[in-house]
Image (tube, grey):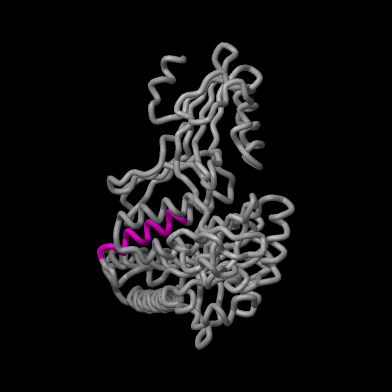
Amino acid sequence: MEEILKLFDDYISFILDEKGNFISINNFDLEVEGSPFIQIFEGEEKKKAAKLFLDALKNGKAGAVLKIRKENVDMVLSFKIVKYQNLFYGIAKEIRRERPSFITDFLGNVIEADEKWKSMEGKNIYDLVEEKEKLSDILSDVIEKGEYEGKIIINERKARVKIKATDCLEFFIEEDFYTILEKILRSRDVDEIVNLAVNALEAIGISYSINLMGREKGMEIEEAISFPILRKGENVGSLAISEADEEKIHQINFLLIAISHALESLEDVSKIINDFAFYKISKEGKILYANTKFEELTGYRAGDIEGKNVDEFAERREEFFENMKEGKIENFVSKWKGKNREFIALEQAWTLNGEILVLIKDITSEKEKEKDAEFYNSILRHDIYNKNEIALGYIGLMEKTNLTKKQKELLKKVKDVLKEAGELIKNVRKAEEIRKAKKEL
């Protein structure tokens, strides 16, 4: 096994004893032989590292994504450990590095910032956020507990933020998952779609391997969950992820929808998801976010409706929230009140991170066409039935005249056919009633 580990030049390789202490380690620049495995980690990562070792002890093998801090940089690595003859053999491959977006002192003065946030240097973070009281509460928690992760608006940019307290405050800014999805929908280039998909997957916080039209990103994953990437029904790639909970699976499904829509738009740039809109609500029904397409669909500006209850604008919300107890809704039809018009909407929804994300599409014209079709179908059935009855009446009159035996036989056949046609019309009506009943269910 030791010789095999030496073949992994691009990996950190190591051997642990049965107590979880390092026996040897390669491609790692710290002296850790004889030290516990968990010692190379900090904070919450120590717990994750301990769980990784205990899982390997119990199951014979285990894997996890962990972070090792070096100076102000977090190395994100994928670890694999297998047990063999009472020793534990492990490898770790670096996935990426996370550097602070900017660093402040404990009073919020920005000391250092990377290129994207360079304009913040020399300023105080309190001058750049909208919710100053919330920020004060967050920083108090960080100083006390050492770490915070959540969402804030900094410098007019909505983002997820991780804050770590060392001898200063380190801010790690990630683009909001939904903002990345909007960028994917607007993208006109396959390489850009792949790179944005990678950003989204990293925002979810999951190990992944993506292959799209010959572009490959990520890492090899054992026991992966795989998803096809479709473009107009054709399989053009795949996404594999490590084991994930239900909420992350919902996020992955939403990402796949965004990628598929973006790929369909590549041929016709003017058709960048004209019918694609989404909004977010709390579990209590308050609107938290709405994208540009939603604004176009309803006529409301996001700022005018955020914070309001969705039942002010949409019907059947009690039924909607009852169905959401399952964690998602596939197809939900309801009437919406837009700013200048009412429309029929088809909605799909998922519970993600304690919030409800809803895709919404205007299907008013489809419903109107369906109603017209039902109306004309009904009239046509009625007219044909009436014509048949008239024909049967004429046949009845003819039967009272002097007919030959041959003529009577022919008239009987015509009469039988008309009766069968009448039964067929009744069956078509019953089938239509059953179809409508099933649709309502």
* Residue 309 appearing in the image: yes
Residue 154 screen position, x and y as percent? 56, 68
Q: Which one is in front, 388 or 195? A: 195
Describe residue 41's horizontal placement relative to residue 373 as left or right.
Answer: right
**What predominant SS class does the magenta segment belong to?**
helix
Report x, y in % for residue 184: 39, 61
Q: Residue furthest top?
A: 85
Residue 389 appears in view: no
Front residue of this view, candidates 435 and 440? 440
Rendered residue at 72%/60% (across/down): 140
Query: Is residue 69 part of the magenta span, yes or no?
Result: no
Residue at 64% x, 79% y: name it: 312
Residue found farthest to the bottom: 340
Q: Residue 358 occupies which quadrant of the picture?
A: bottom right
Please state the horizontal and vertical placement of residue 410, each as a whole percent of the image. 28, 65
| Residue interval drawn in magenta | 255-267
Q: Is residue 77 left or right of residue 272?
A: right
Seen at 46% across and 15% down, the residue is 2
Which of the 4 image quadrants contains residue 321? bottom right
